[in-house]
Image (spheres, rainbow, N blue to C red):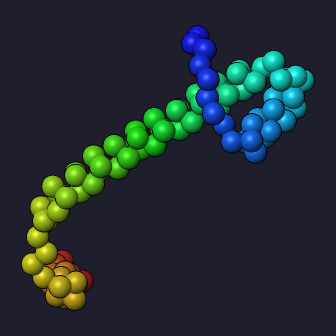
Amino acid sequence: MVKTTVNIRDDIYKKLVREAVEKYGNTKNLSRLINEKLEKAEGEIRASKVDSDEVRKRLKIVQESAGSWKIRKSGKQYVKEIRAGWKGRLKKMSL
């Protein structure tokens, strides 16, 4: 542990003191409370960085794969061809 001096606005200090008293029953654990809050904030920052890295990876995959399937026909044209194929198959099967 390192001791240091930090300037905190009065309203924030009062809030921290109140929270320390509620959580630990005294202000002796004010440093402990501040450390917990800093560790939590640091963890959230790391988690958001991991999330944003994951999003970037997935976006890159999507961008690289875009165009790997070329749409040569409209949906309407595709459906007509499929249905025409059914008719041919039904005739071959004598149905």
Which of 42/3 is in front? 3
Which of 70/65 is in front? 65
- Quarter in which the N terminus is drawn: top right
Which of 27/45 is in front? 27
The image position of residue 6, as x and y in percent, is 61, 29
Residue 77 position (above or below residue 12): below
Q: Residue at x 48, y 39 (%)?
A: 45
Tell whether 73 sits left or right of 40: left
- Quarter in which the C terminus is drawn: bottom left
The image position of residue 11, as x and y in percent, is 76, 45
Residue 32 position (above or below residue 37): above
Q: Residue at x 9, y 78 (%)?
A: 72
Query: Furthest-top residue in view?
Result: 1
Q: Residue at x 88, y 32 (%)?
A: 22
Tell me, yes or no, if residue 94 can be seen here.
no
Tell whether 38 sits left or right of 94: right
Residue 40 position (above or below residue 64): above
Residue 13 position (above or below residue 90): above
How many dots with numbers? 0
Q: Residue at x 72, y 26 (%)?
A: 33
Tell me, yes or no, if residue 81 can be seen here.
yes
Tell whether 17 sits left or right of 81: right
Which of 10/45 is in front? 10
Tell whether 59 sits left or right of 27: left
The image position of residue 12, as x and y in percent, is 72, 42
The image position of residue 65, as x and y in percent, is 17, 57
